[in-house]
Amino acid sequence: MASTAPGEIRENSEGAGVGGSQTLMRGLDVLEAIARESIPLTELALRIGLTKSTTHRLAAALVERGYLAFTPRSGYRLGAKVLELGFLAQEQAELVQIARPILEDLAARSEDTVHLGIMDGDQALYLDKVPGRRRVSISSRVGDRQPLTSTGLGKALMIDHPVRYWRDLFEAEQPAQIGSSYADLWQKRMVDYAATGRAYDLEENEHQIRCVAAPVRDVSGRIVGAISVSSTALYMSDERMVALTDDVLGSAALISRELGWSGKRLKK
């Protein structure tokens, strides 16, 4: 008989072994079963069609991660982590919805690909992409996560962060460059980006691809996203990047104003 890895649940309706994907699906079944009301363990097991012991293991894991909470008299209910993710999902959906027409307009005017992204941990998460009219292939996709230190979008997302954060992240993402002249140049550029409110990608993330990026701010002045215009180096000379800067900054400001930003940046 095949052995079961630690934490793997072997039981299914026929008693056969299952893998991590089915365990994940069962965890989601638990969340959906108690989405509207608190449920005791026995009733929860009946609703999802598992034994009490299996249900308890699933629920206990979800409690540990904050997705469920347990009250002795009423049973299991949704936890604070679900509430947090719900708010984040709502914010992301609103950001995409508000930004989309402005991104489309920017893509039409520039004829280049426009991106919208947010900071996700220490990475840039791409939420939207509007292709340009040029026959240019850019590998980015909605849902991609890219390094902050090598993408224009990522640099724009972190221009309000302290220099120590930039340095630590650069060393983590680009260890081969530690102590090099490029590391010094990169930090000098970041200081300039922070001062001007925009950032560039100078073929640092993808060969022959350059971009101009700017942050998006909410009502408090906090950076909650960033947009970028990307194209090949053929269409993105230094002069054109400078010329595009005001347009990108203006589009980012339009989105920010829709989110309630008054035009004042947070003090560092």
Image (cartoon, rainbow, N blue to C red):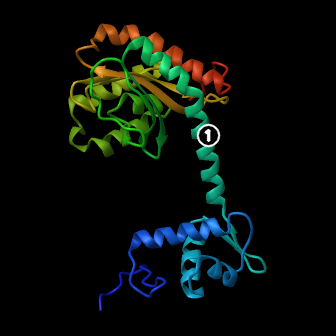
Which sits in the foreground, 24 or 243?
24
x, y (%) of residue 209? 27, 25
Q: Residue at x 25, y 39 (%)?
A: 178
Q: Which residue is mark 1?
A: 91
- Give amino acid for label 1: Glu
Q: Quadrant of the N terminus?
A: bottom left
| Tally of numbered tags | 1
Task: Determine the residue located farthest toward the front in the rendered image.
Answer: 14
x, y (%) of residue 165? 43, 39
Q: Residue at x 60, y 24 (%)?
A: 256
Which sits in the foreground, 35 or 59?
35
Q: Residues within 10 Å of mark 1 (few under 14, many from 20)?
A: few
Secondary structure of the residue carrying tag 1 is helix
Q: Is residue 231 above or below residue 92?
A: above
Task: Determine the residue located farthest toward the right in the rendered image.
Answer: 73
Which sits in the foreground, 155 or 258?
258
User: In which quadrant of the rendered view does residue 202 lie?
Assistant: top left
Direction from residue 173 to residue 155 in the image, left or right: right
Q: Quadrant of the C terminus?
A: top right
Query: Does the rendering let one see residue 126?
Result: yes
User: In which quadrant of the rendered view does residue 63 lie?
Assistant: bottom right
x, y (%) of residue 213? 42, 23
Direction from residue 186 to residue 265 in the image, left or right: right
Q: Residue at x 27, y 13 (%)?
A: 235
Q: Residue at x 66, y 55 (%)?
A: 83
Q: Is residue 92 above or below residue 17?
A: above
x, y (%) of residue 55? 57, 80
Query: Does the rendering let one see residue 159?
Result: no
